[in-house]
Amino acid sequence: MSANAGAADVVIVGGGLHGCSAAYHLAARGLKPIVLEKHVVARHASSASAGGVRRLGRHPAEIPLAQASLEIWHLMGAVLGATGDFRATGQVRVAETEADLKTCEERVALTRSLGYDFEILIDQAELRRRVPAVAHHCLGGIAVERDGYAFPFKTTTAFRHKAEALGAIIHEGTKVIALDRRGAHWEVATNNGVFCAPALVNAAGAWGGELAAFLGDPVPLEPVALMMMASERMAHFVDPTVGAIGRQLSFKQMQSGTVVIGGGFRGRVDRATELTELDFRHLAQSARNAATIFPIMAKARLTRCWAGIEGFTPDDLPFIGPSKHSPAAFHSFGFCGHGFQLGPVVGSITAELIVNGKTNLPIEPFRIDRFDS
Ligand SMILES: Cc1cc2nc3c(=O)[nH]c(=O)nc-3n(C[C@H](O)[C@H](O)[C@H](O)COP(=O)(O)OP(=O)(O)OC[C@H]3O[C@@H](n4cnc5c(N)ncnc54)[C@H](O)[C@@H]3O)c2cc1C
């Protein structure tokens, strides 16, 4: 192992969306970040993702971040020179029963009471206007304008390329195997030598728990294989990304005509080998859900299924912010299947914490030590 493979202002572990976003925001503030990625950029969740850019239904703690992130999504082309093919097609969550409608009313009342007006209740006629192909039994739901979807791989590489243009260095095929604090620096040992920097970012996705433990911040984190399906190209029939209140569904038709279906159905994962195995019983249920909300899907042909590994926490919220037990170390991992939309702003928060020592966004609910007791 070489004594010093590279020195920088910040070493970022993990070349997913969160690592690349942090690299961009740090480089844009004049710092020199190094990203260490054990495979290739966007190897894991950040390319397997469904790519939903969604505020609809977010946990209240995440809403301020999701609001701030959405503004970056809308400026992405100007800021990065590439948009990740973000399309603001809106999102809709469908109610199928009276009980679902009540859930919608309660949800919208909650977000209103918190001061947000981005979610709007829609009745059956409005649902049909926005989503003409929806099944006749659907009664209404919640709609959100300005949300949409993007291409995960393109988004991650957009951040990567802009970060590199501003001086960030990305080392692929470089696995972090140990961390050591020496004086005012982190020494980060990898299969490609030792990297040094005063500050460290843990953006290691489903493996973030291992790094957190190195930093003295052990946390509960479960790796989960989230499954997706895609259809052959179909004639255009739906604009917004559609979910459902009473069943697991995330449904969007890309401009190519391909329909992409998810909804949190789980396969099996081996964290050590980083391999996933699809569960076709669950995928069949996922397909039934899609065909229940969109009868046109009953005859659709599915052409591809895959799974991506994501870290889940017991309260379904990520870890964002400073290490509790190590100096100048920052976490950004465990996004529980909804960190794609948050990627643009969480990188900015991490950069603010490193450069200014604080952020104006409320990150207390995501602190690393919240499960300590
Ligand atoms: C199937 C699926 C669908 C999803 N759909 C949505 C959605 O519609 N909307 C939404 O908002 N979110 C969605 N998500 C979640 C979102 O994609 C993730 O939250 C986000 O991509 C996480 O990015 P990340 O950078 O934290 O993790 P990752 O992309 O997993 O990146 C972490 C990287 O760290 C690297 N790494 C780990 N350990 C080390 C080490 N020791 N040394 C070097 N490198 C290391 C890994 O190789 C990996 O590349 C979905 C996720 C999945 C899997």
Image (tube, helix red, strand yellow):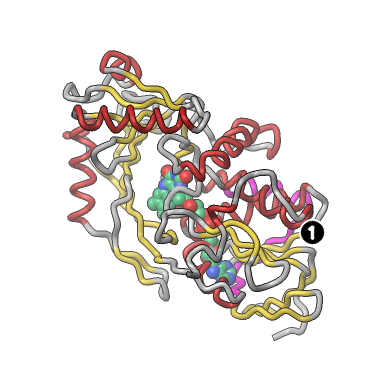
Horizontal side of residue 158 vs 107, given as left or right: right
Q: Nearer the viewer, residue 371 or 169?
A: 371
Please report the residue visible at 78 percent of the width from the left and 69 percent of the height from the top.
198
Q: Observer-nearest residue: 122 or 27?
A: 122
Name the one closer to the observer, 286 or 54: 54
Q: At 23% from the left edge and 59% from the top edge, which residue is drawn?
A: 279
The residue labelled by disc 1 is 32
Tell me residue 159's x, y (percent). Answer: 64, 47
278 to 72, vertically: above or below: below
Start and end of the magenta stretch?
Answer: 156-176
**Is 316 displayed left or right of 17 in the figure?**
left
Residue 21 belongs to magenta span: no
Whether residue 38 is visible here, answered yes or no, is no
Spot occupied by residue 208 in the image (x, y as percentages of width and height): 53, 67
Can residue 8 be seen here?
A: yes
- Amino acid type shown at disc 1: Lys
Q: Quadrant of the N terminus?
A: bottom right
> From the Cβ of disc 1, is ligand 1 less than 8 Å away?
no
Name the quadrant containing residue 13.
Answer: bottom right
Q: How many marks?
A: 1
Residue 115: % across, % down? 52, 29
Q: Residues within 10 Å of mark 1 (few under 14, many from 20)?
A: many
Task: Name which quarter of the figure residue 187 lies in.
Answer: bottom right
Toward which corner of the image does residue 274 lie, by quadrant?
bottom left
Helix, strand or loop at label 1? It is loop
Q: Is 168 a magenta residue?
A: yes
The residue positioned 43% from the left and 61% from the top of the image is 313
The image shows residue 112 at horizontal and vertical percentages of: 46, 27
Q: Which residue does the image show at 80% across and 56% down from the upper left?
A: 31
